[in-house]
Image (spheres, rainbow, N blue to C red):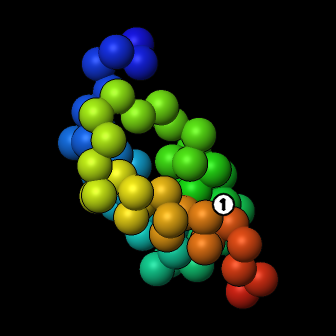
Amino acid sequence: MAENVQPSRFLPKFKLLYFYLTTGQRERSLKQAKLIIDYPVKIPSRQIDEYKAISAVVLTSKVK
């Protein structure tokens, strides 16, 4: 499975994270952020680094 992971696989996950954040679904956003951070990277890119960095901020923020 990990051999097929491409940068484009992260975009739907990140969009779902954004949706959860904008609709106030804190618990789901935390789970989605963790999933993005833990998701394996096959082809490194700046875009994936940004998704993972934003996800890390979501996990460390104390906003409810």
Determine the residue positioned at 61% across, 71% down. 58
Give the camera-side residue of 5 and 30: 5
- Looking at this view, name the residue that lies furthest to the bottom: 63
Compared with 19, 48 (above or below) is: above
Q: Position of residue 10 (x, y in %)?
A: 34, 45
- Which residue corresponds to mark 1? 30
Compared with 21, 16 (above or below) is: above
Secondary structure beneath label 1: helix
Q: Position of residue 55 (x, y in %)?
A: 54, 63
Determine the residue positioned at 51% across, 36% down. 39
Q: Position of residue 32 (x, y in %)?
A: 56, 52
Picture quadrant of residue 64: bottom right
Give the camera-side residue of 19 and 59: 59
Q: Is residue 20 visible?
A: yes
Compared with 11, 55 (above or below) is: below
Residue type at the position of mark 1: Leu
Picture quadrant of residue 19: bottom left
Determine the residue positioned at 48% across, 57% down. 52
